[in-house]
Image (cartoon, rainbow, N blue to C red):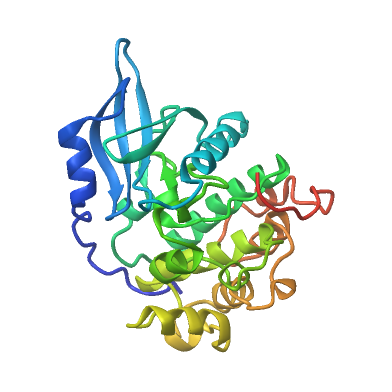
Amino acid sequence: MTGPDPAIPSSPPAVSPFADGLLAGQPFTGYRLRECLDSDDRRAVFQAETAGSPGMAVIKAIRPWPDRPGTAEDFFSLAGGIARLRCPSAARGRDAGRGGGAFFLAYDPVPGETLARRQTGRIGESEALRLVVELARALRDIYEHGHTHGNLKPSNIMLAPKGGKAALLDIGFAWTLAWPDDRAAFLAKSEFLPPERIAGELNVDIRGDLYSLGAIWHWLLFGEPPFKAAAPEEALRLRLESPPVFPRERDPRLSAATSGLMTRLLEKDRDARPRTPGDLMRKLSDHPLLGERETLREGTGDGEAPLRDGV
């Protein structure tokens, strides 16, 4: 049993006008933007050269919503938190600034490309499982260092060229600054957010990241996140109110293990999800398509840090 047949990948997404403008204007002092790794109308990720000395960086740029109160203060406060983060699975922030109507955060060099750009079509069950294991490892790493991500999605995941090792961007970052308020941000970009985040709960913890991982898993297998709808308001309602996702009903070729684990990750009630990334990795270690069970079991005990929110 190998799961769904991979679809023919589409071409990489086009560079947005926002990213094009930054490439043409080169507004960020100390950096020369080179390749756009991912973009939309309000944010972009670039590989960049550092000016005055050989070296590279990853630049995450965001176009803030005009006249939103406190935007600059929020941005630089959160950028400082990212710069202080020390974790092997988190891209290390080293500089922040603004130019060309955008804020930017520069990270130490991260090889590869975003998951959003690498996977532009459906993939098979075994390959998707390998990526989910790698992302569970990355979440376990940041969790054991006392952090949650808060906005895990394909464009915030950098994958190395060989082996697929993941580095996470924008941990705890205020991506909602690109919108007039949180509600508008959720309407525009809620595909991978957990229901409790959309509902405005303040104590969102690592189980929210595990929900996002389940949504990414669904996206890898089916080419779209769960609970799609044409109207943004309807999409939000489905994420908050719809019945559980049963992936095997959509594709009977999926293994019961994949379908069952994904359904657990996508539970509306976070108490029904795995408690921690280590808990998830123990469950993944028993997956019949996985050949490295003992390796996965290392460091997945219940002695992990307690549930917590934010950086």
Q: Nearer the viewer, residue 199 or 118?
A: 199
Q: Quadrant of the C terminus?
A: top right
Q: Residue at the location (35% across, 55% down)?
A: 116
Asked whether 305 or 150 is in front, the reply is 150
- Establish if 49 lies above or below 121: above
View extreme (right): residue: 303
Is 5 left or right of 163, judged from the image as shown? left
Image location (x, y in percent) of residue 99: 31, 33
Location of residue 126 in the rendering, given as x and y in whole percent from the top left corner: 46, 63
Q: Is residue 223 visible?
A: yes
Name which residue lies at 23% across and 36% down: 35
Q: Whole-percent x and y of residue 271?
A: 75, 72
Position of residue 245 in the picture relative to residue 120 (left or right) = right
In front of the other: 110 or 68: 68
Q: Quadrant of residue 299?
A: top right
Which residue is pictured at 40% across the width and 59% down the height?
179
Q: Using residue 22 as the reference point, say whether residue 216 is left or right of it.
A: right
Nearest the eye: 282 or 58: 58
Number of labels in the image equals 0
Whole-percent x, y for residue 41 in the image: 27, 55
Query: Residue placed farthest to the left in the image?
Result: 24
Q: Is residue 125 visible?
A: no
> Residue at image x 49%, y 56%?
130
Q: Please say if 58 is above or below 11.
A: above
| Snapshot quadrant of residue 171 | top right
